[in-house]
Image (cartoon, rainbow, N blue to C red):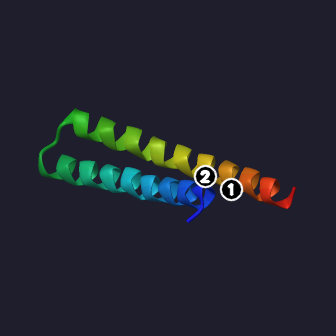
Amino acid sequence: MSLKAFHLFFIAVSIVCAFGFAAWCVKEYMVQPDSNQIIRAALSFVAGVGLIVYGVKVRKKLKNLMES
């Protein structure tokens, strides 16, 4: 596996982890309401969205590098 492919794979795994952690925090908030859990969920969701944006930009950049 090339370094480029590993980087894209690692970004994808990080996205899944960020959204998974957000879902877990929401679940825990439903069981025992705590403002910290909802804050963690929101921050993790934002991180997941940020990772998606980052992944798209990296993919475009790597595609351009491979064509050159």
Secondary element type, mark 1: helix
Q: Quadrant of residue 59?
A: bottom right
Q: Is residue 6 above or below residue 58?
A: below
- Crowd around label 1: few <14 · some 14–19 · many ≥20 (10 Å): some
- Outermost residue on the right side: it is 68
- The residues bearing labels 1 and 2 have C-alpha atoms spaced at a distance of 6 Å
Residue drawn where x is 18% and y is 37% of the image: 34
Q: Classify residue 52 as left or right of residue 15.
A: right
Q: Nearer the viewer, residue 54 or 31?
A: 54
- The percent position of residue 13, horizontal first and vertical second, equals 44, 58
Q: Nearer the viewer, residue 64 or 35?
A: 64
- The percent position of residue 63, horizontal first and vertical second, equals 76, 59
Q: Is residue 1 above or below residue 57?
A: below
Residue drawn where x is 75% and y is 50% of the image: 61
Q: Classify residue 31 as left or right of residue 66.
A: left
Residue where numbered disc 2 is placed: 55
Residue type at numbered disc 1: Arg
Residue drawn where x is 44% and y is 52% of the image: 14
Residue 40 got which mark?
none
Q: Classify residue 4 as left or right of residue 62.
A: left
Dot 1 and dot 2 residues touching (CB under 8 Å): yes
- Outermost residue on the bottom side: it is 1
- The percent position of residue 36, horizontal first and vertical second, equals 24, 33
Residue type at numbered disc 2: Gly
Residue 59 got which mark?
1
Residue drawn where x is 37% and y is 54% of the image: 17
